[in-house]
Every structure is written in C-alpha cells, then in structure tokens.
Image (cartoon, rainbow, N blue to C red):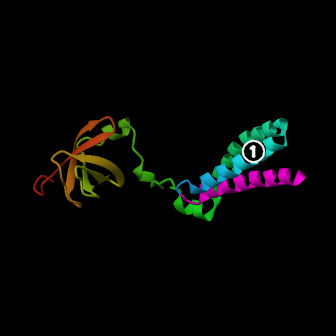
Amino acid sequence: MIWWLVFAVFLYFACAALIIAEVFVPSGGIISLFALGCLIGGVAIFFRHSNTAGWIGIVIAVVMIPSVLIFAYKIFPKTSFGKNVMLRPSERVQGDAVPDTADLKELLGSMGVVLTPLRPVGMCDFSGRRIECVAEGGYVDKGKKVKVIEIESTQLTVREIEAEES
C-alpha cells in the first residue's frame, strides 16, 4: 500500500512540474489539463488509502498550487524566454518628459522647429527643448518653423509660420 502513496506523491510533483511548464510553454491549456489529471489522480489515491489521507492531500494541493504558480511567475521574467517576451519600460531622453505648466507659459509666442511631422500631434524643438505639440491647422511637415499660439494645461498649440513672417 505504501507504493500507492509514493505514486500519489509523484503525481503531485508531476502536477507541480506541469503547472510550471504551462507558465513557460504556450499550450492553450493542454498542459493544464494534464496537471489537473495528475492532481485528481493523486487525490483519488490518497482517498483510497483513507479519508484522513485524502483530506490531507487536498490541503496540500490547496497550498501547493498557488505556491507553485507564484514561484513560476516570479522566475519567469528572469528566464531567457521570459526576457524575450516581456515588455521593457521605454527609455526616456532627458528632454522628452512633459514639462510643468509654469515652464510652458514662457514659451507662448516663441518659435520652434518641427522634429516629427505634426499629424496633428508631434515633437517640436524650442531652443533645444523637445516638446510635444499640436498643430492648429492639422498637418505640418518636418523641418517647418512653428510659433506657439496657445498653451492649455500641458498642451502646446502651434501654428506654421511662413518664411516671410520670421
């Protein structure tokens, strides 16, 4: 009878291994079904031995499954596969941060150059400061000169200026 209990413990370990595999291997839930089969088989063997052993097996399963899942999800980002599929936070350049409203007020009426096409939103350069702007008239090509005509909260509205205006 001891071999049956050893087999039940083996099924629990197989269940844990399959749960970890499900985290790392995209299988559409098939591996989870096998893990569930191992778990049910282990619990059934424990209950065949005795009711007490069965309930102890259920308590172990209730503690084991969340513990294994937490462990697997903590380990996942550190694996080579996890590093390849996890999103990384974007790296921001010093001037790309959204400036405070008080800093923007001083830009009212200033001239700048369009760094990325404004469709109607894009980046403009104002004396070395890269700031996201909204074009008043829709589309403005890269390299055109613009003038800040309105500041609302942290949004700069710019107007393309013609060559004779500068």
**What count of labels does the image hold?**
1
Image quadrant holding the C terminus, namely: bottom left
Q: Tell me where residue 135 appears, x and y as whole percent.
A: 21, 47
Q: 49 left or right of 124?
A: right
Seen as rendered, the residue at the extreme right is 2
In the depicted view, which residue is nearer to us: 77 or 18?
Answer: 18
Can residue 74 be seen here?
A: no
Q: 148 left or right of 66?
A: left
In the depicted view, which residue is nearer to us: 140 or 143?
Answer: 140
Residue 54 magenta-drawn?
no
Circle 1 packing at 10 Å, graded few (<14), some (14-19), many (20+), is some
Seen as rendered, the residue at the extreme left is 164
Q: 1 left or right of 20?
A: right
Q: Residue at x 84, y 36 (%)?
A: 52
Q: Residue at x 55, y 59 (%)?
A: 27
**What amino acid is labelled 1 in the image?**
Ala
Q: Tell me where residue 78 appears, x and y as whole percent.
A: 64, 58
Q: Tell me where residue 64 appears, x and y as whole percent.
A: 73, 44
Per the rendered image, the range of residues in magenta is 1-27
Query: In this figure, which residue is indicated by the disc labeled 1?
Result: 44
Q: Main secondary structure of the magenta part?
A: helix
Q: Residue at x 66, y 52 (%)?
A: 35
Q: Tell me where residue 82 appears, x and y as whole percent.
A: 58, 59
Q: Quadrant of residue 84?
A: bottom right
The secondary element bearing badge 1 is classed as helix
Can residue 56 be seen here?
A: yes
